[in-house]
Image: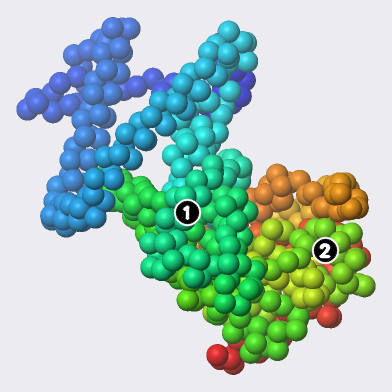
Amino acid sequence: MASAAARGAAARSPLLVHHHRRLPLVHPGGGGSLRVGGPGIGPGREGRRRARVGVRVFARYSQAQDFSTRLQDRVGELPKLVEDLLQTSISTGPRGAFRMAQGIQAVLGVGGEWLNDLSKTANTSAGIPTQMQLGLLSPLYLRRLFERMGATYIKLGQFVASAPTLFPAEYVEEFQKCFDQAPAVPYDVIESILREELQRPLDSVYEYIDPVPIASASIAQVHGARLKSSQKDVVIKVLKPGIEDTLVADLNFIYVVARVLEFLNPELQRTSLVGIVKDIKESMLEEVDFRKEAANIQVFEGYIDAMGFDRQAKAPFVYQHCSTKRVLTMERLYGVPLTDLDSIRSLVPDPELTLVTALNVWFGSLISCESFHADVHAGNLWLLRDGRIGFIDFGIVGRISPRTWAAMEVFLASFATEDYDAMATALSEMGATGNDININEFAKDLQKIFSSIQDLDTEIIVATARTPDATAVSANVVLDERQMNALFLDLVRVSESYGLKFPREFALLMKQLLYFDRYTRLLAPSMNMLRDERINISTNRQLRRTDRF
């Protein structure tokens, strides 16, 4: 029996209403044509049934004709498609077949999980849960599949999570949970990679290397070490074996699927599907080339020096003589995350000034630096032992255009003053698509969204960690991630209802601002980071006009 909701939906949908209307009578006319409404088929039940069958057959025939016509129109593009697919297949090599086998195994594994979960709901009155109705394409099971498929798909999942302007909200929310932690590669394998990359005995470069990794993720593994020449403590980031080939094979497969889909359905070109895949591919391949990360660090160091921030902030020094495409040797920084309140108080007299410094350095980098740090979570933003702010891990950086920043600057100012008309104007300029926007209505919707930010739950949790010498107490801010994600997704959803489409850099910026909002709640709860006179946001407009380096 249909539910009330389903009946209501049917009443509202013109497509569903059509099926409840009495269809006109149809019968074959002269010359093989279909003639509507003439004599020949009586008004009885059998006649109406045959009429409906005729309409469905005609509709399907028309759709097939339409699809066939679209393909014929694109025949001229077929040679280019075939050439593109062949070149992609050649560049993939034999690794593609191996990854195909792994993919089948992953699909079977997650498919088994879905069937098992489905069997548990089969005998319940509630029916199949929404998250299971799409099978392996539902957000939950697709995330599990991505995690089983390894590095490429984990990174792809993280891209989905960071791009709510490109992907449906349900997928963005689910992929926030994408877990990037992998078993450690045995040290003898890491040692072999280091020898191959550095082309000299390791004991001529390093005094020692700790065989136990500091961290192990899907793409790289990090070990502590000490340099032989300078006796400096360093960390060595090593690309895991086979990752490059796996990435190329996986990304080529995704590219092929996107190209074929766009060829079969030209309307997908409006969504820039192939363009999005190319951007993902370029971003991921940059992440496995540690020369890019080294360059990002050096650019940021140049910004710090040029702006006179060298006594306030620091990025790890890169040792070029023992760094390559697959190995990155960096200065080891010692400090505490910006969420470790008790330790911060032991290092500096005023934690609030620490936060002001971090904000000024980061805001300045948005415009005055070629790229900005786009992952300032607590693991990557530290207070160092010497009182400076340490920016760590430049694998993910963002680049913002002057046009986007100009709108973003107005957005931040209007957010601080709760001027929703100005905020609506700024967002409409940033995501402009040529549509006429009702600024007043948009402003009212924005006010509804942002009035809820004060209701976000922030909880201070005190964790006690015992050591042989003392008891260290650290306070950490735990902010309900789902509430923050829901807030941002509401902003995107409402904006898209007005025809706006934001650049991905806007999502990256907003994510970092949410991180800083957490730090503010812990280190300076009475401070408004967007209105405080000590924090330079608006002056960055002048810096943008001056090419500092």
Residue 368 in sight: no
Residue 275 in which image quadrant: bottom left
Q: Which residue is mark 2?
A: 520
What amino acid type should be assigned to the residue bearing mark 1?
A: Ile
Q: CA distance from mark 2 to mark 1?
A: 40 Å
Q: Residue at x 91, y 53 (%)?
A: 470
Q: Is 277 in front, or is 312?
A: 312
Q: Residue at x 23, y 49 (%)?
A: 93
Residue 63 in which image quadrant: top left
What amino acid type should be assigned to the residue bearing mark 2?
A: Thr
Identify the image quadrant of the C terminus.
Answer: bottom right
Q: Is there a contact, CB below 8 Å, between mark 2 and mark 1? A: no
Identify the image quadrant of the N terminus.
Answer: top right
Residue 349 left/right relative to 311: right
Question: Which element type, helix, strand or loop, lies under badge 1?
Answer: helix
Q: Is residue 115 above or below residue 205?
A: above
Crowding at dot 1, Cα within 10 Å, few <14 / some 14-19 / many 20+, comes out as many
Residue 486 in sight: yes
The label shown at residue 418 is none
**Which x, y percent locates residue 33?**
13, 28
Nearer mark to the viewer, of 2 and 1: 1
**Which x, y percent locates residue 100?**
31, 37
**Which x, y percent locates residue 98?**
30, 39
Please report whichever mark, 2 or 1, sits nearer to the chain's N-terminal start. 1
Q: Which residue is mark 1?
A: 190
Q: Residue at x 89, y 62 (%)?
A: 525
**Which x, y percent locates residue 538?**
72, 82
Q: Is residue 129 above or below residue 469?
A: above
